[in-house]
């Protein structure tokens, strides 16, 4: 269902000098006339799929703990699911309030700071965990002796804690005075102020966007190196099973690179472009549908992550195939017995319905039609 954000300018027939975004921050609801339509379906779907998908991923991780034994990769996956699912669960109720109130709800400064903190922390921490997972695959495949040390579990826990601490630092800079929070179009979400013209806002925007772009480049470079290494192994190894495993690894890494780049890069590029003044201010004063779109792309990465890293991994798919085969075998046994019973019943009905004639030689012959009866009489 679409929601309307309506404003009416009173006492003037001229185009107002103030922009849409400045109106949003001024809090004066009697100075404008403009209607913006936004559907509540996308945020509702993102909230549902984000929470449910990450919850399912955590359940699958817990149930399959005996198989993966909480190896480093799966510890990072667990941290990623907690970060993504928890972030969406904590921030999206504030988003849905604005849609439910038909965009008339005025975000208090404290709530806007809270929303911007959750968004910036969740997105940046999620990106760093994805990069750490790519580095985990890099060392596991290219340097297995270094990777398989005795304290690798503790090392992974320290890496995960460090990522969360660094994400916490980056997401609180604008709350500690280096920049500010900003309520973006259509007043349903807050983020660090990357459309502001002040020096502090621009510095904070540069720090956040450059960090995000470096994480993206590192993730792409590491995955490309791993893919090339696996391809070289495939040329040397002609065993069919080994080639199948290598193909699965390549497909998995390619999907990671494509999804992460598509979802994460647009937001970082937009933030950097605004901070560097490479992007022209829109009619809404710098923030509009484009900024809303790139944010939704970034949140989509948090929704897709559990399906890639857990639910679509080879181990999970093999488990689903085994379950499918087991169900098919059970259904096959049931259907076979059902078929045998039907055959028995049908033969019994046929014997009852079809008359039997005993010939002089003592043979029994079924008589199923008038033609066969006349033939039998002739034979007798």
Image: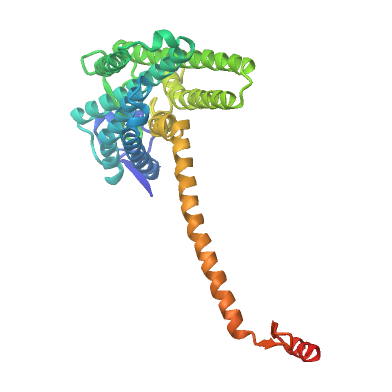
Vertical comparison of 365 with 187: above or below: below
- 89 on left or right of 331: left
User: Residue at coordinates 35% horizontally, 22% vertically from top-left?
Assistant: 71
Quarter location, residue 101 = top left
Q: Residue furthest right?
A: 378
The number of numbered badges drawn on the structure is 0
Instruction: Please state the horizontal and vertical placement of residue 75, each as a whole percent of the image.
Output: 32, 23
User: Residue at coordinates 48% horizontally, 15% vertically from top-left?
Assistant: 141
Quick one: quadrant of the C terminus? bottom right
Instruction: Please state the horizontal and vertical placement of residue 229, each as a whole percent of the image.
Output: 55, 13
Q: Nearer the viewer, residue 283 or 196?
A: 196
Vertical comparison of 2 with 218: above or below: below
Instruction: Please state the horizontal and vertical placement of residue 308, each as a whole percent of the image.
Output: 44, 31
Q: Residue furthest front?
A: 361
Q: Nearer the viewer, residue 181 or 355?
A: 355
Instruction: Please state the horizontal and vertical placement of residue 161, each as a whole percent of the image.
Output: 26, 17
Quarter location, residue 348 = bottom right
- 239 on left or right of 52: right
Quarter location, residue 22 = top left
Q: Is residue 5 visible?
A: yes
Q: Nearer the viewer, residue 173 or 229?
A: 229
Vertical comparison of 379 with 119: above or below: below
Q: How is the image coloured?
A: rainbow
Q: Nearer the viewer, residue 188 or 347?
A: 347
User: Residue at coordinates 40% horizontally, 28% vertically from top-left?
Assistant: 298
Vertical comparison of 67 with 5: above or below: above
User: Residue at coordinates 45% horizontally, 41% vertically from top-left?
Assistant: 320
Q: Is residue 313 visible?
A: no
């Amino acid at each position: 269902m679409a929601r309307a954000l309506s404003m009416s300018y009173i006492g003037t027939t001229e185009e107002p000098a103030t922009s849409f975004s400045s109106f949003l921050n001024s809090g004066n609801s009697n100075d404008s006339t403009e209607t913006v339509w936004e559907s509540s379906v996308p945020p509702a779907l993102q909230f549902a799929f984000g929470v449910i998908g990450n919850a399912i991923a955590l359940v699958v991780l817990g149930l399959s703990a005996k198989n993966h034994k909480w190896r480093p990769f799966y510890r990072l996956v667990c941290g990623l699911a907690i970060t993504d699912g928890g972030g969406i669960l904590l921030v999206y109720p504030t988003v849905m309030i604005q849609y439910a109130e038909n965009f008339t709800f005025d975000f208090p400064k404290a709530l806007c700071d809270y929303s911007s903190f959750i968004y910036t922390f969740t997105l940046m921490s999620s990106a760093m965990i994805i990069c750490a997972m790519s580095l985990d695959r890099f060392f596991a495949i290219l340097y297995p002796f270094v990777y398989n040390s005795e304290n690798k579990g503790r090392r992974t826990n320290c890496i995960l804690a460090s990522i969360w601490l660094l994400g916490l630092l980056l997401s609180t800079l604008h709350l500690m005075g280096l920049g500010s929070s900003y309520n973006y179009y259509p007043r349903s979400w807050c983020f660090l102020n990357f459309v502001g013209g002040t020096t502090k806002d621009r510095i904070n925007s540069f720090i956040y966007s450059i960090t995000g772009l470096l994480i993206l480049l590192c993730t792409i470079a590491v995955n490309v190196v791993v893919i090339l290494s696996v391809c070289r192994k495939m040329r040397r190894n002609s065993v069919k099973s080994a080639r199948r495993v290598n193909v699965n690894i390549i497909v998995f890494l390619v999907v990671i690179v494509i999804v992460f780049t598509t979802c994460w890069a647009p937001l970082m590029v937009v933030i950097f472009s605004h901070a560097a003044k490479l992007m022209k201010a829109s009619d809404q004063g710098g923030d509009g549908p484009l900024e809303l779109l790139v944010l939704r792309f970034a949140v989509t990465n948090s929704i897709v992550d559990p399906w890639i890293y857990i639910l679509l991994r080879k181990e999970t798919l093999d488990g689903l195939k085994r379950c499918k085969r087991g169900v098919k075998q059970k259904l096959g046994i049931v259907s076979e017995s059902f078929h045998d019973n039907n055959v028995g019943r049908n033969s019994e009905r046929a014997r009852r319905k079809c008359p039997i004639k005993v010939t002089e030689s003592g043979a029994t012959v079924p008589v199923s039609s008038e033609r066969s009866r006349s033939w039998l009489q002739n034979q007798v």
